[in-house]
Every structure is written in C-alpha cells, then in structure tokens.
Image (spheres, coloured by chain):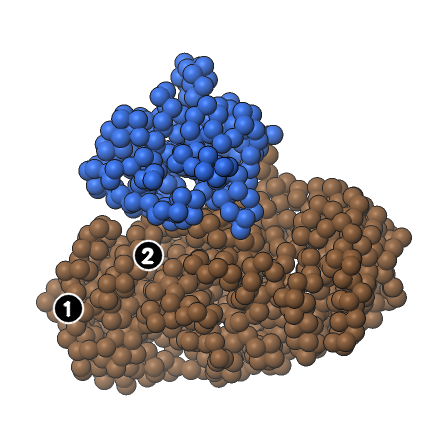
C-alpha cells in the first residue's frame, strides 16, 4: 500500500479536495501533517495542497516555506520520496528552494478560475507516465499568482533537463507563465510543482477524469487499474 | 486621543446617533436616568434601522416563515432547512451596500465575510456562495472602478476562505449610480442535531471572545447603513471595516473543532454593532444578564474607549459561552489556530447588560429591553400607482430580428458574466456540479451518494419599480423557476430587501407592496422565507435606487444523475415551449435596448400557473424526460433559445406559431420554460403535457450551427457567442489591462 501524507498550513483550503481525491483514487485516507510538525509520517507521497497559507499576505507560500514541517518535507524529498505541490503548494516549494523559479502575479492581475488545456511535456516520470507525451489534457486552474518565471540560465537548464512536466496548450495560458510552463519537476524528478488542480478533475461529477492518472502514477496504481 | 465616558449628552449628540426625540424619551425611561456616552452608543447601535428593522418589522412579520422542512426560520444568524438524512442546509443573504460604495474592495470583501460567519456560527461548513451585484449605468465615471473593486473584493475574500461562488447576478441601471448594491449569499451544510444558536444558558458561565483583535474600524457602521448619502460620502471611508479572510478561515476551523468537542453552549458572531449586538443577543434570548469587562478584550489599538470597543465592527470575531470544564480543550484549539481569545465576562441572573472598563461601570442597561423594546414603526405609506396593460401592437417591431437579438444578447444586462465569475473560485471543495452561467448553481451534498443542492438569486428591479407587488411576486417566481430548471425541488428562500428612504411614503409603499407580493408568492410556491436582511436608505441626494428585493432560493436535487443543464441538449432533440406565446413587452429588455424606453406595467405572475407548470417540469425532469431545460426570463423566448444554443454549442431550427413576432420572441411573460426532449420521447412527452393540462408547443429541433426561428432569425451560434462574450471584457478594458501588465 502506498502511504500519502497531506501537509496542512493555516489557510490551506484545497486540503479537503486533496484528501477526497487521494481517498477516492487509492481507497485509503491520507495521513495529515500540521505545519508545526517536525517530522512526517512514513510516506511514499507527500502533498502540499492549494490555499492561501498564512493568508499569503506576503509573497504566496513565503511563510509556509519557512514552517518547521518544510524541513521534514525537504529531508523526505532528498531521500527520494515523491513530493507534489499544487497551486499554493507549488508556490511553497519554489519559496522553499525545492523547485527552481518563482510564481508571480497573473499577467491580468486578477484571480483566474477556469478550465485550461495542458500538454504533457515529459512523461518519463511516475507523476506523468499515465499520459502520452504531448497528450493534451483538461485541467482547471484557480489562482492569483501563477505566472511562472525563471531567469534565462535556470530556464535553459530546466528545459534541457526535461524538467517541464506540463505546459498550457492551445492558447490557454491563463497567467503569462514563461514558455507556457504549468508544472515542473526538480532535477531528480521526484518533486513536482504545478499550478493547475488535477484533484478537481478526478470523477465524472467533476465533468472529467483527466486529473486521475497523475495520482495513479504517483501512487503506482496505473497497472492495477489498466489490468 | 480618545473620547472618555464623561462626554455630555446634548441634543446634537443624540441626533448624530440617529436617535429622534421620541426614541430618546423612551431611552430615558428604560435607562431610568440620563444614559452615559457609552450607553447612548449602545442604544443607538441596537435601535438603528440596520439592527432593529424598526421600519420593516411590521411587514416582515406577514411573510410565511414556516414549513415542514424549516428547522429555524428568521431570528437566528441564518435559516436552517431540513434536506433529509439528518442533514440541514443553513443559509442567508445580506447586504453590504453602503460600505461597498464607499470602499468597493473592502466593502464587498467584508460583506462576504459577514455572511460566511453567519453560516458557520450555526455550526455549518459553508459550501456555496452567491453575489447579487447592482451597479450604476456603464458609462457613469464611477462604475468601472466599482465593478472592478467589488468583484475583486468578493473573490479576494471567498477564494481565500475557500468557498465556491456558484451563482449570482450583475445588473446595471442609472438608478444605482449613487448607491450600488452588494448582496452576499452563503449556504452551509450541517447535521440537524449539531446546530448552534445564540441563546445563552446557565448563570456564572464564562463569556469568551475569539478571533481577531478589536480596533476602531467600523465604529458606527450600522448607524451609517441607516442613513442616506449626500456629497460628503467620501468622509465616511473610515467607517468601512477591513477584511481578513485568513483569520476567518482559521476561525471557521476553530469553531467547528470547538463545537465538535462539545464545549460550546452558545455562540454569536460579531457583525453589525459588534460586541454590543452579539452580547445582547446571547443574553436577551437566554433570559440572562451579561457582564463584560472590557479590560480583557484583545485590542489592536491603544487607548480605546469603552464606547469604541462596544461599537467597533472589526471583522472575524466571535463571542461564545463555553462549558467551564472544557476550558483546556478549548484553549488547545484556539492556540492551534493561533487566534486571540479571552474570557471577557460572564452570564448573570440580573438581566442587566453591565460593562466595566478601567475599574468603572460605564454602562448598566436592561438587556431584554435593548433587544426587544426597539421602536417599531408603522410608517405612512401610499399604495403604488398602477399602469394600464399595453398590447404588443403598441410597441414597434425591430427592423431586423437578427440584429435585435444580437443587440439584446450583447447588452449590459444580458451579456455573459464570465469576466466576473472567472475571478471567483467556482470549483473549490470539488463538489460544484453546475457553475455560474446556467439557471442555478448546483453543489452536491458531500457524503451523500445522490443528493445535490441548487442555488439561485433573483429579482427584476425594473418590474418592482413598475409594480412592487407583481415585482415582488416575480422575484420569487423567477427564483423558483431557476431551481426547477435544474431539476431541484424549491425548498425555501432568503430575502434581501433593498429600498430607499422608508420615511418617504412612496418608498414605504414600495416596501409594503413588495413584501406582500413576496409573501403571496412564497406561500403559493411553498418557499418559506427562513432568513433575510433589510437595507433601507439607499438614496443619494434624494434619489432612491430601483426597489430591489433580492430573493436567494435553495432547492434539493434528489438524484444528481437526473439533473438538467441549460446546455446539455443533443442534435436531434425536440424543443418544447412550456407555456404560451409571449405578449408582454412593457418593461422588457427589448423595450429598453431596442426602443429606448422603460415604461408600462410589469408582467403579471399567475402563481397557480407558475406552480402547475413548475411541478410539471420538475416531474418531467425527475422522470428523465428532459435532455436540457431553461427558464424564460429577461429577453424572452429568443434570448432563452440563444442561451441554450450558446451553452450546448449547437443550433436549433424552430418554427413557431406567432401572432406578434416581436412579442413572441422577446416578450417577458412569466411561468415559461424551454425543454428539450429526445426525439423518440417527443410524442409521449407532448401527450403528457396535454394530459396534465399544461400549455405547450413543440417549436423545433436541436441541430446545425445556426439558431433559426421562422423566417425571422437565422444566425450562427458562434456569432451569437462572440457578441455575448465580448461586452463585459470590452467594457472593463481587459485587453488594455493585460497589455499594460506585459
């Protein structure tokens, strides 16, 4: 059985969506870690969910990145545990230095919640192996600060290393992200940060299930479902 | 520096508190002496229009508030309605009009915050929000600024708090130039036996303050909301509160944890008139006195006086009575969520509201009288005038029906609101089944395999202006139809009555007639009013808003599988009109946009017909006949068909028997729907309509790329969509903004 831990900060608000998604997809409720915890339960997948941690009154994710629990997350990541940060979780991972680059205010300066298209830029990774290379999937976004940016050197590096996981496709870039980047891996490939919310597109009631395969991949559940 | 409690009570001071001579005489009698400055503030806070409903109470009492599903009606923080399986839905709508005009972002944000607090104070986790927004004419120099501020304020608060915004309204009219309306709705889910109310029980128990610190923001806010505006309005900015959705989110989680622990006896959020209103409410309802020691109140500013602390409207604060034996458990929860808390007083048995500050008793008032003895006025009113009926031939037909339809569908009031709702998180919590843009927002009931709730907010102010009684009925009827159109059984409603100055007999007449209309419709359609809010004095320099009694309705969908949508028709489906041919063009969007007039009578609502057709449509949806459904409202049949085509991305070919083409296409007659039905069931469906005695006509077939109606309209759905989608972004200059940011 794969063990998932969801990290909660004051102001996390898609934690419940993520708990529901993991429970529905894996059949097991995830463990929860609080921001003040100094260690994590044994986990195969650690998820930092969306929200407005600490209100995001400073840069989004900046305070969460300095929480005691993030040390434990960094240690787990260094050991090769899979780490997924969605939305505020992505912002937190960049602020914590676990992922390169930064997320700036959307180019239209407003919050945006809509469905976009993502193309899978690298499927040689557990998180994305359930998708075809360049496959275009649907996924909703809901954020104010999702405009991904990295300096030229970093950008060249992540592009050349195949660290781009997802790009906004078919002209749906909702926030001005450089190179249409919607999600990136760390260099080792076990940490994924993304602005879109796959957890909100996992069952027919959501109007689609394109997000499901990401979690199935991360939890090594792909074979069991296709078999 | 600050004012102390020895401020002399002068006639000027009394009148600046919005208290008239007669009221003051009553205050003297109830106090038994001249009130202190703090006491005057407390009386004023409890007796202003906003808190006491003194002008409207007499008429509100006539509304139907009871029903087999009603658990709590008006009088609590929000209404509570049974949805079966021990679940209840808790909901209310409330205005934040005055603050939003002065400071749109914070005004709207704190409006959302206030209504969410009303819902979770009762132990319900908020699951849906809506916002009914009304702005001045698009060309007014302030309108863009207000739209942009209000929309980002609504989003800024709701998105961070984490509630999906699933519906609402946005309208423009010159009569809102000086007073915009921001009506915020929230609904939450709870278990029937886990509802909390404000009534305190037990003597000598600790009164606990929880949440944000108290500052000077909002001092006198409720009194401001009970006065007209004039040109000095900008000076009122300091009375607008500042919202902190993060603290509210922590407060939500802390309150729900605290309730689950069994520590809470009574709880009341601090809304209008803050500490005063919440403490009086808890004591008066429980037949208890309350003694407060203000030295223990967490403050964020120095040297606050008792007066300021009692009247502060700082946001994100709660007052509660806790079980003493659970104190440690409660403290752990407060600390986990890093919220300020303090024991600021206790319940007593003397029925007095006693306030202590720096070793002095600064107020000692009879608590029951503060709440219950507020004046109640039977203000003079005049019966609104009437208009004679206007036959369709009195209205000029358009030169070109295609152009007329495009003009309507791209007009400020009928164009797509995507620009607005894409700034709201509509998906959070993962339960949204229908997003804004359809008839009603739909959210599934978490933990239940098939149930869902539908939410709609409705009123047509131009009808209410023409005829407050029919307009009041129409607001309820349209809400009813919107719920039905998704396959929901309408359960109950909340009303948010926005009017001008009730001291003017014509305005009071509008209020009286509208309430009568709402009451009649709610009775006929079995939608009791379970909560609500009244916002009067919406006037600037003597000009009142259009009378706007917003109705927020909640419906229950038993089986999500059989829910209908506006855009789920498929090629080949038969198109049915439920109801009769359109005839009513007075006060229609057609009259306004094409003929440039707003005159004549409002459409009449035949409530028996509404109910008969509504029940028929609901039964048809529940027996799985309908592939899609939409109610006919603003813009009439042609607009309804166009909206269905845009939503499905497919055309329709319609042939309609027509007497007056412009009235048939654009008339706004009530009690009508469009339904699509699979071709193989069309005959059976028609037979059912006939059997049920419901007027209907098979008017066309779904398919193709164009919307075709007789030889009048032939237009590509793509073109309709482009026009429909472009007004709002063009108006708000989004493209320019995006370029500026790059």
Q: Which mark is residue B229?
A: none
Q: Which mark is residue B324?
A: 1
Name the residue located 31 percent from the left edge and 30 percent from the top edge. A81
Name the residue located 46 percent from the left edge and 23 percent from the top edge. A124
> Quick one: SS at disc 1?
helix
In three-dimensional space, the C-alpha distance between marks 1 and 2, rounded to whole angstroms, equals 21 Å
Name the residue located 71 percent from the left edge and 53 percent from the top edge. B569
B28 w.r.t. B666: above or below: below
Q: Quadrant of residue B110?
A: bottom left
Residue placed most toward the observer, B546 or A30 = A30
Q: What x and y, as percent, mark residue B645?
A: 72, 50
Circle 2 residue: B252
Q: What x and y, as percent, mark residue B332?
A: 18, 55
Total labels: the figure holds: 2
Residue placed most toward the observer, A100 or A201 = A201
- In the rendered image of this protein, which colour is used for chain A? blue
Q: Residue furthest left?
A: B359
């Amino acid at each position: 059985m794969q063990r998932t831990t969801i990290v909660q900060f004051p102001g996390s608000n898609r934690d419940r969506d993520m708990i529901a998604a993991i429970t529905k997809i894996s059949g097991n409720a995830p463990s929860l870690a609080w921001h003040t915890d100094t260690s994590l339960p044994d986990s195969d997948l650690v998820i930092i969910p969306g929200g407005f941690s600490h209100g995001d009154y400073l840069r989004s994710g900046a305070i969460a990145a300095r929480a005691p629990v993030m040390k434990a997350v960094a240690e787990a990541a260094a050991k090769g545990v899979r780490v997924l940060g969605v939305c505020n979780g992505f912002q937190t991972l960049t602020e914590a230095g676990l992922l390169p680059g930064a997320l700036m205010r959307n180019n239209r300066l407003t919050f945006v919640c809509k469905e976009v298209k993502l193309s899978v830029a690298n499927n040689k990774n557990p998180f994305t192996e359930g998708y075809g290379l360049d496959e275009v999937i649907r996924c909703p976004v809901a954020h104010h600060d999702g405009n991904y940016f990295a300096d030229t050197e970093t950008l060249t590096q992540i592009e050349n290393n195949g660290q781009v996981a997802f790009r906004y496709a078919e002209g749906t870039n909702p926030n001005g992200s450089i190179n249409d980047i919607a999600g990136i891996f760390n260099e080792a490939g076990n940490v994924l940060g993304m602005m879109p919310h796959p957890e909100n597109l996992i069952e027919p009631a959501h109007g689609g299930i394109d997000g499901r395969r990401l979690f199935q991949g991360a939890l090594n559940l792909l074979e069991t479902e296709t078999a | 520096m600050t004012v102390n409690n020895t401020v002399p009570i002068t006639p000027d001071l009394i009148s600046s508190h919005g208290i008239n001579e007669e009221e003051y005489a009553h205050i003297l009698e109830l106090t038994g002496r001249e009130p202190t400055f703090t006491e005057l503030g407390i009386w004023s806070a409890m007796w202003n229009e906003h808190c006491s409903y003194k002008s409207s109470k007499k008429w509100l009492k006539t509304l139907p508030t009871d029903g087999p599903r009603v658990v709590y009606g008006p009088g609590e923080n929000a209404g509570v309605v049974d949805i079966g399986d021990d679940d209840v839905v808790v909901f209310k709508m409330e205005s934040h009009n005055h603050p939003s005009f002065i400071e749109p972002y914070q005004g709207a944000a704190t409006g959302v915050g206030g209504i969410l607090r009303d819902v979770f104070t009762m132990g319900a986790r908020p699951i849906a929000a809506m916002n009914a927004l009304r702005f001045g004419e698009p060309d007014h120099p302030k309108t863009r600024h207000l739209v942009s501020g209000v929309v980002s304020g609504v989003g800024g608060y709701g998105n961070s708090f984490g509630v999906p915004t699933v519906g609402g309204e946005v309208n423009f009219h010159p009569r809102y130039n000086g007073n915009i309306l921001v009506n915020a709705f929230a609904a939450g889910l709870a278990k029937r036996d886990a509802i909390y109310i404000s009534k305190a029980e037990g003597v000598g128990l600790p009164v606990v303050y929880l949440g944000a610190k108290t500052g000077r923001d909002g001092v006198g806010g409720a009194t401001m909301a009970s006065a007209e505006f004039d040109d000095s309005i900008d000076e009122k900015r300091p009375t607008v509160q500042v919202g902190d959705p993060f603290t509210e989110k922590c407060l939500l989680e802390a309150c729900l944890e605290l309730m689950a622990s069994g520590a809470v006896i009574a709880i009341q959020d601090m809304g209008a008139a803050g500490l005063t209103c919440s403490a009086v409410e808890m004591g008066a309802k429980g037949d208890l006195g309350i003694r407060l020691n203000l030295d223990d109140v967490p403050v964020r500013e120095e040297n606050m006086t008792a007066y300021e602390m009692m009247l502060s409207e700082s946001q994100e604060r709660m007052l509660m009575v806790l079980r003493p034996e659970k104190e440690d458990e409660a403290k752990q929860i407060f600390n986990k969520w890093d919220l300020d808390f303090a024991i600021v007083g206790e319940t007593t048995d003397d029925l007095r509201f006693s306030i202590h500050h720096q070793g002095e008793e600064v107020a000692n008032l009879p608590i029951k009288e503060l709440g219950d003895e507020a004046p109640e006025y039977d203000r003079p009113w005049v019966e609104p005038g009437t208009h004679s009926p206007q036959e369709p031939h009195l209205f000029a037909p358009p030169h070109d029906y295609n152009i007329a339809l495009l003009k309507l569908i791209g007009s400020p009031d009928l164009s797509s609101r995507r620009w607005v709702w894409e700034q709201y998180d509509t998906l959070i919590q993962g339960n949204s089944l229908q997003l804004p843009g359809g008839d009603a927002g739909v959210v599934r009931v978490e933990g239940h395999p098939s149930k869902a709730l539908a939410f709609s907010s409705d009123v047509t102010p131009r009808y209410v202006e023409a005829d407050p009684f029919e307009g009041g009925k129409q607001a309820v009827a349209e809400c009813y139809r919107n719920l039905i159109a998704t396959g929901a059984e309408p359960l109950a409603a909340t009303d948010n009555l926005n009017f001008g100055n009730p001291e003017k007999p014509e305005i009071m007449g509008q209020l009286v007639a509208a309430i009568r209309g709402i009451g009649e419709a709610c009775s006929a359609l079995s939608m009791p009013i379970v909560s609500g809010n009244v916002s009067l004095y919406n006037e600037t320099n003597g000009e009142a808003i259009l009378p706007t009694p917003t109705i927020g309705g909640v419906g229950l969908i038993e089986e999500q599988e059989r829910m209908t949508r506006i855009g789920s028709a498929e090629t080949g489906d038969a198109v049915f009109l439920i109801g009769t041919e359109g005839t009513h063009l007075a006060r229609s969007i057609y009259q306004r946009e094409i003929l440039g007039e707003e005159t004549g009578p409002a459409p009449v609502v035949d409530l028996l017909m509404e109910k008969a057709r509504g029940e028929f449509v609901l039964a048809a949806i529940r027996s799985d006949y309908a592939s899609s459904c939409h109610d006919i409202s603003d813009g009439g049949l042609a607009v309804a068909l166009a909206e269905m085509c845009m939503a499905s991305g497919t055309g329709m070919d319609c042939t309609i028997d027509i007497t007056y083409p412009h009235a048939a296409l654009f008339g706004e007659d009530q009690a009508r729907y469009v339904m699509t039905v699979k071709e193989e069931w069309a005959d059976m469906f028609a037979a059912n309509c006939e059997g049920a005695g419901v007027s209907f006509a098979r008017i066309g077939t779904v398919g193709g790329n164009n919307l075709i109606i007789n030889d009048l309209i032939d237009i590509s759905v793509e073109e309709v969509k482009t026009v429909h989608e472009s007004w709002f972004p063009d108006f708000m200059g989004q493209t320019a903004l995006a370029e500026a940011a790059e």
